[in-house]
Every structure is written in C-alpha cells, then in structure tokens.
C-alpha cells in the first residue's frame, strides 16, 4: 500500500476507529512507531493510501479533521 496521509490518535481510541474502518471497508494500516512520523507518547498512526474524495469524506468525518501528509 502506498502511504498518502495519516492521523495520530491515542491508543484508547484505536479499537473503535479500527472496527469502524473495517466495517466500511476502508484500507489502512496502523503504525506504532516510525522514524518518519513524530507521534506523541501513547499515540499510534492510522495510515491511508490515496483515495477517492467520496471515500475520504467518510474518513474525514470519522476523525473530525483533515489527515496529515505522510512523509515521502
């Protein structure tokens, strides 16, 4: 999967977000630590590929903000 953007979230929110994304069949991976991403302690990144704007709208609504560009 080519990584395009990500959201940083606390571990406590992972279960709900993961289940929701799987239910609506949106592709993602979870990164716990990365040299490329500056994650706060206790946070993980939900990483997504490029997607159609209609699909992105669901992700935007779920996370309630725009994702950050994944460093190239």
Image (cartoon, rainbow, N blue to C red):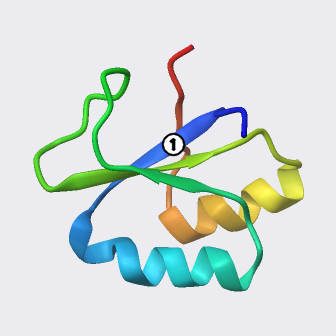
Judge left or right: residue 66 versus residue 55: left
Judge left or right: residue 52 versus residue 30: right
Residue for point 31% across, 49% down: 32
Residue for point 16% across, 42% down: 40
Count residues near mark 1 (Cα–Cα under 10 Å), then give few for <14, some for 14-19, many for 20+.
Answer: many
Q: Nearer the viewer, residue 59 or 21?
A: 21
**Residue 34 on image: x %, y %:** 32, 31
Res. 35 image quadrant: top left
Judge left or right: residue 14 versus residue 10: right
Q: Residue furthest top?
A: 72
Residue for point 55% across, 45% down: 66
Judge left or right: residue 3 versus residue 30: right
SS at mark 1 in the image:
strand
Q: Nearer the viewer, residue 2 or 68?
A: 2
Residue for point 74% across, 60% down: 57
Q: Nearer the viewer, residue 29 or 43?
A: 29
**Residue 25 on image: x %, y %:** 77, 74
Which quarter of the rendering shows the N terminus?
Answer: top right
Relative vertical location of residue 31 with respect to residue 39 in this rendering, above or below: below
**Residue 49 on image: x %, y %:** 72, 42
Residue behind mark 1: 6
**Residue 54 on image: x %, y %:** 87, 59
Res. 15 image quadrant: bottom left
């Amino acid at each position: 999967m080519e990584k395009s953007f990500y959201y940083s979230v606390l571990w406590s929110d992972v279960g709900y977000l993961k289940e929701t994304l799987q239910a609506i069949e949106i592709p993602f991976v979870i990164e716990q630590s990365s040299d490329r991403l500056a994650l706060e302690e206790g946070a993980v990144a939900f990483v997504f590929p490029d997607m159609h704007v209609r699909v992105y709208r669901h992700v935007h609504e779920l996370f309630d903000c725009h994702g950050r560009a994944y460093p190239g």
